[in-house]
Amino acid sequence: MNKGLQITLYVIAAWLLVLGLLFLLLPAVAAQVMQTTLPDKALNMLYGQVMLTFAYIAFLGSRGGEGLAKLSRVVLVLTIGHVLVFGYQLISNMASFAQAGPPLIINLIFSVLLFIFRRDLKT
């Protein structure tokens, strides 16, 4: 396995784990981190659970094996999706740069790294 891809997937898994736990267990802290209000407690819990699920998928992908190409593709789609959503929020003034900028930049970096390190995988 490409060591760069493995490290990138581990870092993404850790990032998603932290965010998922914040949304699930400490939504007030998540609101401070994201610099926004989180009015829907049920939706926050659901979002936290989804983040934890993707953290697990990234972790499984980092472990290698036969499903590595597919699992890393799922994580790539996730990060590109986040770039598109946060980019749209910035362009349309739905969110300020303080709210959408940092996650946009982080997910853009993850997307580029995944794209680079996935090139030698058979998909």
Image (cartoon, rainbow, N blue to C red):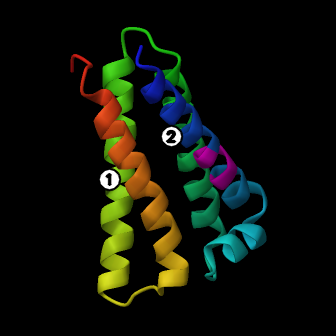
In this figure, which residue is indicated by the disc labeled 1? 80
**Neighbour tally class for label 2: few under 14, some 14-19, many 20 plus, Cα within 10 Å:** many
Nearer the observer, disc 2 or disc 1? 1
The image shows residue 86, relative to residue 57, as above or below, that is below
Looking at the image, is mark 2 or mark 1 earlier in the sequence?
2
The image shows residue 97, relative to residue 71, as above or below, that is below
Does the image show residue 70? yes
Q: Is residue 104 left or right of residue 51?
A: left
Q: Main secondary structure of the magenta part?
A: helix
Task: Point out the image quarter for the C terminus.
Answer: top left
Disc 1 residue type (three-letter): Ile
Q: Quadrant of residue 22?
A: bottom right
Query: Residue, x 62% and y 64% (percent of image)?
Result: 44
Which residue range is magenta in the image?
15-19
Q: Which mark is residue 54?
A: 2
Q: Residue 103: x, y in percent?
A: 50, 65
